[in-house]
Image (spheres, rainbow, N blue to C red):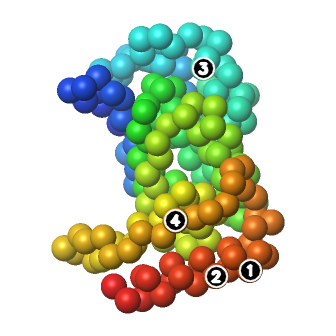
Amino acid sequence: MRADNLVFKSKVSRIISFLLLVSIILSGLTGCFPLYESNIDITGINSFLDIPGITEDEIEHLLHKLGIWESRNKYPKELSVGMRKRLGLARCLIAKPTLLLLDEPFAALDVDTKLESYSVLQNLQQEYGQTIIMITHDLQEAVLLGNKIVIASKLPFRINKIINVPFEYPRTDKLYSEIVFQELTNLVRKGISSC
């Protein structure tokens, strides 16, 4: 299993989840963090059901929505990279965070899996209503998924530019052929080049 996320409760009782680019592998556990119980306590939560207010129906709904319900009891080596990413996303979302931090969540996915994952993320964001901050080096991904694109300098970190994205959700890859989409992608590229 991959422990792709950490869950914290802040002092103001808001939940923050994040999905890391690099994961720690816990190969002795099955996929769903585990779904119901485990001998290993990862973040103070022994299972999804230890999270206050989470029901079995909610767990099942989320895993179905992410397309991983049938694989919930598999080990990491039995899951594709895309399924592991979805599992990490499920672990983040199940806590119903108000803030979701994603560090290149779609890196290393094939094109079809990326496009499907973009759709799933948008649908889940609309259903759960989180604020999502995502780090990506894929310019088209940033324009397709973002409301605002923050272009930052190399270290020391500094915000160089913020670009508003005008498209309505949900968005699909059909936007790639739109002139405005291409212009925004070029604007982001120029913003990065000027850092």
Q: CA distance from mark 3 to mark 2?
A: 40 Å
Q: CA distance from mark 2 to mark 4?
A: 12 Å
Residue at image coords 65%, 12%: 57
Which dot, 3 or 2, sits closer to the camera?
2
Which dot, 4 or 3, sits closer to the camera?
4
Q: Is residue 144 left or right of residue 191?
A: right
Query: Which circle's residue, 3 or 2, is located before the other in the chain?
Result: 3
Query: Which circle's residue, 1 or 4, is located before the other in the chain?
Result: 4
Nearest the viewer among 66 and 156 is: 156
The location of residue 187, given as percent across then percent down, is 53, 82
Nearest the viewer among 183 and 138 is: 183
Q: Which residue is mark 2?
A: 183
Q: Amino acid at mark 2?
A: Glu
| Crowd around label 3: few <14 · some 14–19 · many ≥20 (10 Å) | many
Q: CA distance from mark 4 to mark 3?
A: 34 Å
Q: Which residue is mark 4?
A: 164
Query: Which circle's residue, 4 or 3, is located before the other in the chain?
Result: 3
Q: CA distance from mark 1 to mark 3?
A: 40 Å
Q: Which residue is mark 1?
A: 179
Which dot, 1 or 3, sits closer to the camera?
1
Q: Is residue 55 left or right of residue 20?
A: right
Q: CA distance from mark 1 to mark 2?
A: 6 Å
Q: Which residue is mark 3?
A: 59
Q: Is the C terminus in the top left, top right, bottom left or bottom right quadrant?
A: bottom left
Element under disc 4: strand
Q: Is residue 80 above or below residue 92?
A: below
Q: Amino acid at mark 3?
A: Ile
- CB atoms at circles 1 and 2 under 8 Å apart? yes
Element under disc 3: helix
Nearest the viewer among 23 and 11 is: 11
Q: Amino acid at mark 1?
A: Ile
**Can residue 71 be spotted in the picture?**
no
